[in-house]
Image: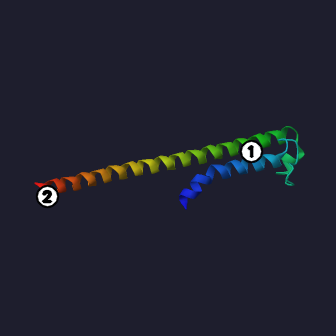
Amino acid sequence: MARFLQVNFRKVLATQLRMSSDQLGELGKGAGKGGGGGGSVREAGGAFGKKQATEEEMYFKRKEKEQLAALKQHHQEEIDHHKKEIDRLQQEIKRHEAKITQLKD
């Protein structure tokens, strides 16, 4: 289940970003196309609306970077775990081969 979520994370994120950007309209120019205005400051438009829109975009970009960093870290931990497992299994193979060699002698 976790692997399914990891694989589709980027697809979902890209779809969410695409859908949200379609509904925004032009940032800072009042209410968006989706029916929601995003608050009174954004609805009013003007300099404050543009500032609010910019701050929101920066927030979401930061969040996206944090999520991608966490996903990258998770994958690195998975890689490290599998490498350790490979080493353990190779040691087991050597141990069994040594036993076979002892039995032949």
Q: Earlier in the sequence, mark 2 or mark 1?
A: 1
Foreground mark, 2 or 1, reads 2
The answer to whether residue 70 is above or below residue 2 is above
36 horizontally vs 85: left or right: right
Q: Position of residue 103 (x, y in %)?
A: 14, 58
Q: Depth check: give the residue in front, 2 or 104.
A: 104
The residue drawn where x is 66% and y is 50% is 11
Q: Position of residue 47 (x, y in %)?
A: 85, 37
24 horizontally vs 12: left or right: right
State the mark number for residue 64. Answer: none
Residue type, label 2: Leu
Q: Position of residue 73 (x, y in %)?
A: 51, 47
The residue drawn where x is 69% and y is 46% is 60
The residue under label 1 is: 56
The residue under label 2 is: 103
Classify 10 Å Cα crowding around label 2: few (below 14), some (14-19), many (20 and above).
few
Residue type, label 1: Glu
Q: Quadrant of the N terminus?
A: bottom right
Q: CA distance from mark 2 to mark 1?
A: 71 Å
Q: Quadrant of the C terminus?
A: bottom left
Q: Position of residue 50 (x, y in %)?
A: 82, 39
